[in-house]
Amino acid sequence: MNIDRQVLIDAGILKKPPREVAEERGQDKPNQAQVLVELAGEAIFIFTPRGDVFASVPVGQHRENWPVRGKGFRRWLVRRFAEVYDKPPGAQALQDAIGLLEARAETAGQRGEVHTRLAERDGAIYLDLGNAAWQAVEVTASGWRLVSEPPVFFWRPRGMLPLPAPQAGGTLAELAEFVNLGEERARVLAISWLLAAARPQGPYLLLMLHGEQGTGKTLLARFLKALLDPSAVEVRTSPRDERDLMIAAANNWVLAFDNLSGLSGWLSDGLCRLAS
């Protein structure tokens, strides 16, 4: 069935391309960069305390949050342009538009934090499941529930993997069925660390796993990380320097290091700063 395009425009279902609007107003045709900036009007821009700019954009029935300079936002903007003009924008126009949007966000964007995996708002804790629907779990004193639009902004660094949607029931005692936690004291320590790590604000506990070769230290480290913050890199070798440590911390909620024979002064200091 063919439906007249003008009928859809008059009904508000379809928007006129910016070029047509400009022609009707007797204005010069906007260039591609100007068109891209206008098409980005559906985005919410967030300027973080660290000076980073993120865009929260509508995708289907949910919103996704991406660094303005990252691939996620670029692809969204290209798709929006292609939906109107049936072709991609020029590379330079895309670069110019992103630069302008970033500059505007610094003065006109929403001030706030963009979180990785965990956040807190008004006494509630939000855990980003990392799934395709961008759902989160809201945890309060009265219980938990799955939410599709959390009141905080999350973003997904490269390598982040999704958590399964939680199911009601179960006990912490069931953890012992999956890994060897040893004696009761060790089980209490591991569970205490896990609960502390699920808080959006520190200070945090540093969990040290030690034992003979083959006792399952690496397996336990992978398991505990996967319970809260699964990622493509399960356990890491010792970072080369403080910069590597901080980059890893910015892109993960839980860091698990394997085969550490000791801690250098800078690494000990860096871990203490992260934990506090």
Image (cartoon, rainbow, N blue to C red):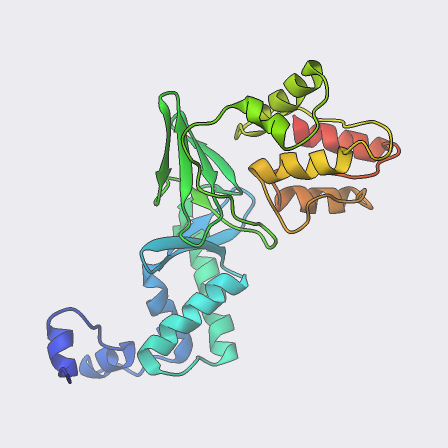
Asked whether 190 or 107 is in front, the reply is 190
x and y percent of residue 266 in the render? 82, 34
Q: Is residue 153 above or below residue 25?
A: above
x and y percent of residue 49 in the render? 52, 42
Q: Residue furthest top?
A: 185
Residue at the image position 11 percent from the left and 78 percent from the top: 7
x and y percent of residue 107 in the render? 42, 51
x and y percent of residue 50 in the render? 56, 44
Asked where in the image residue 152 lies, by quadrant, the reply is top left
Q: Residue furthest front?
A: 177
Asked whether 109 or 150 is in front, the reply is 150
Q: Is residue 257 above or below residue 183?
A: below
Q: Classify the position of the N terminus by image quarter.
A: bottom left
Asked whether 256 or 51 is in front, the reply is 256
Would you say 178 lies left or right of 104 here?
Answer: right
Would you say 218 lies left or right of 204 here?
Answer: right
Can residue 179 be seen here? The reply is yes
Residue at the image position 44 percent from the left and 37 percent from the top: 166
Residue at the image position 43 percent from the left and 27 percent from the top: 169
Q: Classify the position of the C terminus by image quarter.
A: top right
Can residue 255 be seen here? The reply is no
Residue at the image position 88 percent from the left and 34 percent from the top: 261
Would you say 81 lies left or right of 51 here?
Answer: left
